Amino acid sequence: MKREGYALWSIGISPLGCINKPAEPFPYELEAEIRAKYEGALAVCDDGGVVMIEKSLLNDDTLQRLNRIEMQEDICFYCLDTLKWDTKKIVCDKAYLSETDLLSKVHIQQLLELKKPLD
């Protein structure tokens, strides 16, 4: 998500833990500011976390970028789960670009789509 330039933000830590302590009320002014910015926004959630995409950025370009991210994740998870490659081989070496004989036709098509420029 950072690579695509979407805003990532977080305040504090997880409210879950072995000891729950009473917390101060969330500041009203900050709540109003956040609500104004993100009301009607889209939350994209996965194993790596959550990102909010502001309503003003919900357009065809953002959808195309999200589809590309999903394609990339499909290929990476296939290489990790099915081919049992290690993370270095997938993320750093991008071996799926050269060892394409191990990929399905769908993955090959996704790689072709990922090579197309967005801008």
Image (spheres, rainbow, N blue to C red):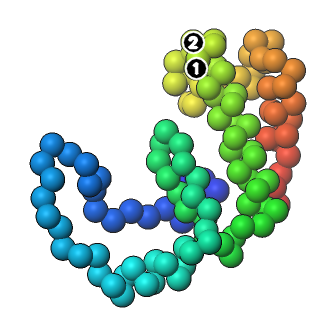
Q: As shown in the figure, which amino acid type bears the numbered disc 2?
A: Lys
Q: Position of residue 95 (x, y in %)?
A: 67, 22
Residue that carries the numbered disc 1 in the rendered image: 80
Q: Is residue 57 above or below residue 61?
A: below
Which one is nearer the viewer's eye here, 38 or 85? Answer: 38
Q: Is residue 48 above or below residue 88?
A: below
Count of labels in the image: 2
Residue that carries the numbered disc 2 in the rendered image: 84
Taking the spot 85% from the left edge, 46% from the top edge, the residue there is 116
Q: Position of residue 94 (x, y in %)?
A: 65, 28
Q: Which of the 4 image quadrants contains residue 4?
A: bottom right
* Circles 2 and 1: CB atoms closer than 8 Å: yes
Does residue 27 appear to the left or right of 41 in the view shown? left
Taking the spot 66% from the left edge, 21% from the top edge, the residue there is 78
Disc 1 packing (10 Å; few <14; some 14–19; many ≥20): some
Q: As shown in the figure, which amino acid type bears the numbered disc 1?
A: Leu
Measure the alpha-carbon separation of dots 2 and 1. Answer: 5 Å
Seen from this angle, which residue lies furthest bottom?
29
Does residue 70 appear to the left or right of 105 in the view shown? left
